[in-house]
Amino acid sequence: MERESSEVKASSKFKRICVFCGSSHGKKTSYQDAAIELGKVLVSRNIDLVYGGGSIGLMGLVSQAVHDGGRHVMGVIPKTLMPQELTGQTVGEVKAVAGMHQRKAEMAKHSDAFIALPGGYGTLEELLEVITWAQLGIHDKPVGLLNVDDYYNSLLSFIDKAVEEGFISPNARHIIVSAPTAKELVKKLEEYTPRHERVASKLSWETEQLDYSQEYDISR
């Protein structure tokens, strides 16, 4: 009974978290360690992983850690990138899609929250899009930055500057949750409550406006 109680206590409010991250390892081993640690934290909280597919870079490390821990892994990958010489072997479930736009919609559809590990252009593009979707009212899922070794400090400073200059509202600044460790970040995401005013309600967003079919509805 004691073991069962501890397992229940460890479970998270999230069933699946989408992780955006680099297809490179980065120069610091701390980035790689953080990807593996995030995977282990997801396993410890009984959370499944949704990610961009493949086995290279940080993407491969976090997916392998979750898979090795016995949780479900879904890799969403465009057919063009499926050859193993481009992205490696995806562990777990592979969901092939037509292109990048559909990939992001599919990842969002299957996730309860989003976390960005260190990454490059692709990671930033995915991250900023889900932040924008939250601001517009398309979803109310929490978005987190795993700020390993202050990797995202410059981005956070830019966002603070945009608030200062009147391009982002102070309440919308709180869409982004950040923390230096995976354990702390997941805890913050679980405690997240939206504070910003949405541009439109979720109900008013028709799927046709976003070129999504009902199959790719990303809202809760």
Image: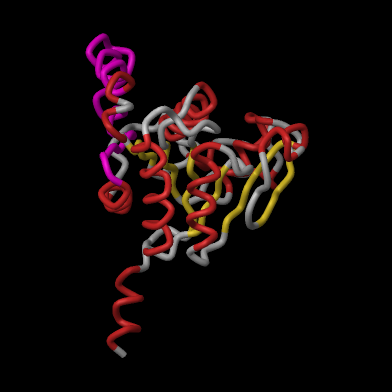
Q: Is residue 136 visible?
A: no
Magenta residues?
Answer: 156-181
Horizontally, residue 9 falls left or right of residue 96, namely left
Asked whether residue 162 is drawn in magenta, I would say yes
Q: Position of residue 169 (x, y in %)?
A: 29, 22
Q: Which quadrant does the N terminus fall into?
A: bottom left
Query: Looking at the image, which is closer to me, 19 or 129?
Result: 19
Up-down relation of residue 106 to residue 7 (above or below): above
Colouring style: secondary structure
Q: Position of residue 194 (x, y in %)?
A: 32, 41
Query: Looking at the image, which is closer to me, 168 or 115?
Result: 115
Residue 92 position by quadrant: bottom right
Residue appearing at x 43%, y 53% in the figure: 39
Q: Position of residue 30 (x, y in %)?
A: 34, 38
Q: Position of residue 98 (x, y in %)?
A: 76, 35
Query: Looking at the image, which is closer to me, 59 or 128?
Result: 59
Total marks in image: 0
Q: Is residue 220 visible?
A: yes
Residue appearing at x 55%, y 49% in the figure: 50
Asked whether residue 154 is drawn in magenta, I would say no
Residue 157 position by quadrant: top left
Residue appearing at x 52%, y 62% in the figure: 68
Up-down relation of residue 83 to residue 71 (above or below): above
